[in-house]
């Protein structure tokens, strides 16, 4: 089987370059989602599972969840237990870049192997439909009056949701260091907090709240993209609401450290094939994700640049000293 061959590192790059879909179908993969079920990373991992197996690129794909600390608990486990294993992958993204800094993680992204960035997604700010906050101006007015009294629900501390709450405060002229942000480990928990009236507003990727928005339980205050989303043409952008803010979340896939160049090529080729399949295209459309594939050296450069950018933002808003 290809998996066992990979583990011995005995396949040449020339042979790997010519692998057919049938040969790829021998791949048996494990994908870690370093978060609770119901969130963006979990959704990405399970979407990959679906696309890889349905397209015949992999024989089997097992998804596991390791929750906590913005993905850094899962990252530590991946660094320490998956080294050299060419059958394992981990989903991560923008959230983890900030969480590593905020949590002073003993491990970081330099200790694993970049494979590819695969998606990007606009963020959305929502409130329950019975909230007195009707639009971005209403929310901005409350934040300017007293940012500490506006409670935000979102993903892990230091992640894109947290950063966006701080940037929203800064964009409307409030003190971003006083933002009252409540992190949740999964999208389901954040949703329950909003619907239960325990927070003022919620932030996440549009896809995570789409069902509740269309069901009339949540109202969109604004999306963080430069233009309205194709799958949500009625949802205004924050800029339309008078808040000059644009943020895109991105998600990627990584392999363990210590894999051979041949193993890395097989994994990279499998992901590159996956993002070109009709199965993946259907998933992107259904979830409202943008195709943001970036592989190889370009992705490594992107990671370094993003780390520098996120570090600056977190310092500017007082989340990291």
Image: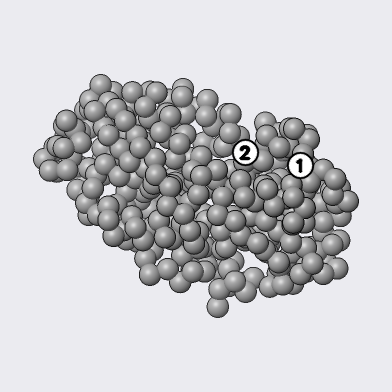
Crowding at label 1, few (<14), some or many (≥20) Cα neighbours within 10 Å?
A: many
Quadrant (top left/top right/bottom left/bottom right) for the N terminus = top left
Identify which residue is drawn at 86% across, 55% down: 138
**Residue nearest the observer in this picture, 292 or 61:** 61
Identify which residue is drawn at 73% across, 32% down: 214
Whole-number angstrom distance, CA of label 1 to CA of label 2: 13 Å
SS state under label 1? strand
Tell me the tag on residue 218: 1
Quadrant (top left/top right/bottom left/bottom right) for the C terminus = bottom right
| Earlier sequence position, callout 1 versus callout 2 | 2
Tell me the tag on residue 94: none
* Residue 302, visible in the rendered structure: no
Crowding at label 2, few (<14), some or many (≥20) Cα neighbours within 10 Å?
A: many
Residue 266 location in percent, x, y?
26, 37
Mark whose residue sits in front, 1 or 2: 1
Report whether 52 appears left or right of 190: left
Residue 98 location in percent, x, y?
52, 62
**Residue nearest the observer in this picture, 56 or 309:** 56
Quadrant of res 286 = top right
SS state under label 2? helix
Identify which residue is drawn at 51% across, 36% down: 291
Report whether 201 appears left or right of 247: right
Residue 181 location in percent, x, y?
67, 63
Identify which residue is drawn at 77% across, 39% down: 217
Q: Residue furthest bottom?
A: 321
Q: Is residue 169 depicted above or below 225 in this figure?
A: below
**How many labels, in total?**
2
Describe the colour scheme in one phrase.
one colour
Residue labelled with disc 2: 207
Residue 241 location in percent, x, y?
82, 49
């Amino acid at each position: 089987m290809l998996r066992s061959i990979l583990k011995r590192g005995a396949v040449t790059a020339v042979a790997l370059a010519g692998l057919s879909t049938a040969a790829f179908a021998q791949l048996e993969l494990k994908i870690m989602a370093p978060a609770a079920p119901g969130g963006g990373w979990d959704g990405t991992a399970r979407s990959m599972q679906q696309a890889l197996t349905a397209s015949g690129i992999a024989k089997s794909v097992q998804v596991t969840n390791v929750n906590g600390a913005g993905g850094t608990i899962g990252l530590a486990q991946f660094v320490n237990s998956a080294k050299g294993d060419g059958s394992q992958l981990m989903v991560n993204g923008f959230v983890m870049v900030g969480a590593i800094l905020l949590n002073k993680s003993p491990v970081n992204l330099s200790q694993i192997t970049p494979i590819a960035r695969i998606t990007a997604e606009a963020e959305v700010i929502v409130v329950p439909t019975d909230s007195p906050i009707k639009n971005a101006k209403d929310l901005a007015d409350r934040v300017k009056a007293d940012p500490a009294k506006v409670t935000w629900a979102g993903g892990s501390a230091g992640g894109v949701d947290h950063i966006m709450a701080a940037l929203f405060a800064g964009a409307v002229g409030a003190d971003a260091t006083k933002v009252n942000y409540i992190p949740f480990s999964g999208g389901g928990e954040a949703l329950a907090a909003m619907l239960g009236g325990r927070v003022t507003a919620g932030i996440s990727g549009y896809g995570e709240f789409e069902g509740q928005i269309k069901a009339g339980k949540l109202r969109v205050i604004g999306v963080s993209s430069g233009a309205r989303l194709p799958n949500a043409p009625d949802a205004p952008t924050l800029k339309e609401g008078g808040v000059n803010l644009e943020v895109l979340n991105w998600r990627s896939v990584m392999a363990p450290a210590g894999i051979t160049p041949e193993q890395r090529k097989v994994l990279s080729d499998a992901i590159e094939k996956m993002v070109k399949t009709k199965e993946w295209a259907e998933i992107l459309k259904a979830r409202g994700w943008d195709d943001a594939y970036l592989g190889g050296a370009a992705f490594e450069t992107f990671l370094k640049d993003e780390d520098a950018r996120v570090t600056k933002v977190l310092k500017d808003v007082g989340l990291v000293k």
